[in-house]
Amino acid sequence: MTEIPVQCVSPGEVEAPLILSLEPLSLWGGFSATSGAVIDRGHPAFGKVLTGRILAMPSGRGSSSSSSILAEALRLGTAPAGLVLGETDPIIAVGEIVARKLYGKSLPIVVCGLDVLERLQSGYTYRICARNTGNAVLARILR
Amino acid sequence: MELTDFDRQLMAGEHGPAAVFAMDVLLSFAEAVRAPRLLDITRAHIDGCLYHGQVSLDFVNRLVERGGRVRVPTTLNVGAMDLLHPTLVRTTGPEREAAQKLMQAHLALGCESSFTCAPYQTRFRPHFGEQIAWGESNAIVFANSVIGARTNRYGDFIDLCCAMTGRAPAVGLHLDEGRRGQVLFRLSGFPESQANDATFVGVGYLVGERSGLRVPVIEGLPHPHSEDQLKALGAVAASTGSVALFHAVGITPEAPILQDAFGPSGIPQETFDIHPKDVEDALRRLSTVRDGTPIFAVSLGTPHFSIEEFRSLVPLVAGFRPAEDVQVYVNTNRETYAALEASEMLAQIHKAGLVVVTDTCTYVTAIIRPDKGVIMTNSGKWAHYAPANLGVDVAFGTLEECLLSAAAGRVVRTGK
């Protein structure tokens, strides 16, 4: 098991299958908080359910309304189990902060850099281990 | 993070429990964007009136329940309802109720009932150098670029937290170093006399597409006839890209000359040359149908139509009638609507059969019927978003072309 050092944006520990999207996904207009699925027809991950998965992507994209969609998905329990981002994304951070303060619901978010992101493997189970504001670890689980 | 005495008072509840909650969210956000401190803001513009689910209401109600009041003059962006003309919007049931509740909850916090995407057209317009916290992409780019006020790209939740505390993270476009140009667009071959509204839309389209998150500098832009042309440029650049500030050399206030735009030691990371042909290509990409295609509606005023734009529109609609089954909509804000009512203009506009929409916009809610078919617009922003938001086809054209087409019932170009 190789451990990749990453940076913690939102703490938490989770182990789940990873979906890698090299194209950014706008949660607003691109993801349904009701179904947990990708609904942007032009996106390579169209139709995939993100609930219970770790979503890895370079960053969010576009509208600040994506904050609301992530918070709403956390409220409904349809959000991804964790997020791995290539670079920090304030809009995604806001969605997590609001769901945590309003509902006590959260998900781990880490930033790994774009070069590391490209080497992650879709379909494999990964583990995010992110403690408060410190350095975090991302690891592929070998079975 | 460095906190002032006032920040500590807010955190300790000396300004009420709603401010404690807002400050808590704001400080978490400031940490996420690595702000070393907060700074004072004097105005806010809230983009939270569109309903995205229960969380939209829960957040604002948390502040209302705790007796919250905004600390600075705070305008509201368009909502999903036309409160002055409620029958125009066809949304029904729980969605309609939620949209109304959301608008009302913001008013309970002391926000102004402006319901406009163009707060810079109202009496709440900021001045040069003012630190503000604005949401709504076109308002952000206008405030930063055309006025020289300073705001980052605020959005859902955080804009309201800034309004409730009068504070914002001191990073990015609030600071001198964040406002310097990074990428250069060199325009050549654009004769001043031939530049029309569409030229500014086409340039904005390309600038947005190629800038990404960088601050663009435009050299050689024809001198605009009105600030509405810069409004149109910024609005489309913030739609095809994430542009929050542009400098137009010799036109916008922070770029009298090229060196000012890039700062003392700055050089562009990248340079793009733009010719009239590139602009024509960009404009063609905004239309999803061919000339001559039948249309069933025209939408003007995205961002909201200004009083100056109404002054140019009124003489054009003297003796004008749209073709049967073609509806012409003009989106605007309440302040402008009141000015229209107070003059002869509203009567002339109604006489020509145009529908004036306030408080909202035809691309965010269900106004235009039927829901399928071709709509024409003079807005690059509308043309960019409507196909996805409304599922319609779009033709982009100048104001004159939109009116000619409305009268003909199909897409018509001037000079053809």
Image (cartoon, coloured by chain):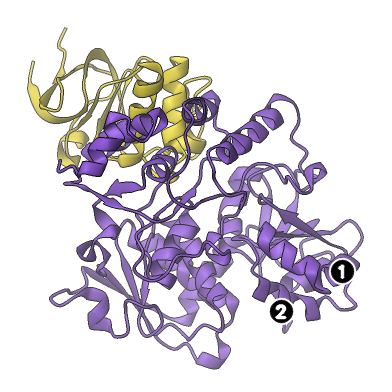
Residue at 38% over, 71% down? B128
Q: Given the image, what chain letter belongs to the residue carrying mark 1?
A: B
| In this view, B149 is above or below A56 | below
Camera-side residue of B98 and A74:
B98
> Residue B337, percent across and down?
73, 62
Report whether B350 appears left or right of A4.
right
Q: Which residue is mark 2?
A: B312
Q: Quadrant of residue B163?
A: top left
Q: Which residue is mark 1?
A: B347
Report whether A100 appears left or right of B368.
left
Camera-side residue of B287 and B9:
B9
Amino acid at the residue labelled 1 = Ala
Q: Quadrant of the N terminus of chain A?
A: top left
Q: Earlier in the sequence, mark 1 or mark 2?
A: 2
Q: Given the image, what chain letter belongs to the residue carrying mark 2?
A: B
Amino acid at the residue labelled 2 = Ser
Q: Mark 1 Cα within 10 Å, few/some/many (few <14, many 20+)?
A: few
> Residue B23, percent across and down?
32, 35
